[in-house]
Image (cartoon, rainbow, N blue to C red):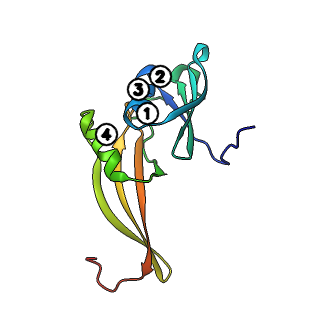
Amino acid sequence: MRAFSRLVPELACADLDRSLRFYCDILGATVLYDRPEEGFAFMELQGAQFMLDRLENAWLTGSMEPPLGRGVNFQIEVVSVSDLSLRLADAGVATFLGPQTRWYRDGGVEHGQVQLLVQDPDGYLLRFAQSLGARAVCSDPAD
């Protein structure tokens, strides 16, 4: 029996084969199961789960114009942003932002990460993050 995350986004895509090539061949995701006849795939990338579904199968609440997924980004924790950055560069895929190092305050602690943002073939914004651990809040905002 497979364990499923409590939140699994389902991304509508215009061309499932193109999206599968991007997620599997470039990013290194794995198809856990699929229903090719329905245009559906359940994916996993370093523990993060998500689904891809043909656009015509999706529950649509409005018109779908590229880029899809406006206003949301999906943070996916990865072991190495650097390795992912090289894979994207080798495939000729431009990044949206980064890689960059950022520290995010949570009370008296800052959590650091190296992050890289890239759009998938349908325009969904993916934010890959590699943890740098935590530190006390720094008084110099330039750090």
Instruction: Name the amino acid type tagged 4.
Output: Arg
- Secondary structure, mark 4, is helix
Q: Name which of mark 3 and mark 2 comes first in the sequence.
A: 2
Q: Name which of mark 1 and mark 2 comes first in the sequence.
A: 2
89 in relation to 6, above or below: above
Of tags 1 and 2, the one toward the viewer is 1
85 in relation to 133, above or below: above
* In contact (CB < 8 Å): disc 1 and disc 3: yes
* Place of residue 34 in the rendered image (x, y in percent of width and height, measured from the top left): 60, 24
Q: Name which of mark 1 and mark 4 comes first in the sequence.
A: 1
Q: Which residue is mark 3?
A: 21
Q: Which numbered tag is attached to residue 23?
A: 1
- Secondary structure, mark 2, is helix
Of tags 4 and 3, the one toward the viewer is 4
Q: Which residue is mark 2?
A: 16
Instruction: Name the amino acid type tagged 3.
Output: Arg
* Place of residue 92 in the rendered image (x, y in percent of width and height, measured from the top left): 24, 34
Q: Which residue is mark 4?
A: 87
Q: CA distance from mark 1 to mark 3?
A: 6 Å
Question: Which quadrant of the figure has residue 87?
Answer: top left
- Left-right relation of 6 to 90: right
* Place of residue 19 in the rendered image (x, y in percent of width and height, measured from the top left): 43, 27
Of tags 3 and 2, the one toward the viewer is 3
Q: CA distance from mark 3 to mark 2?
A: 9 Å
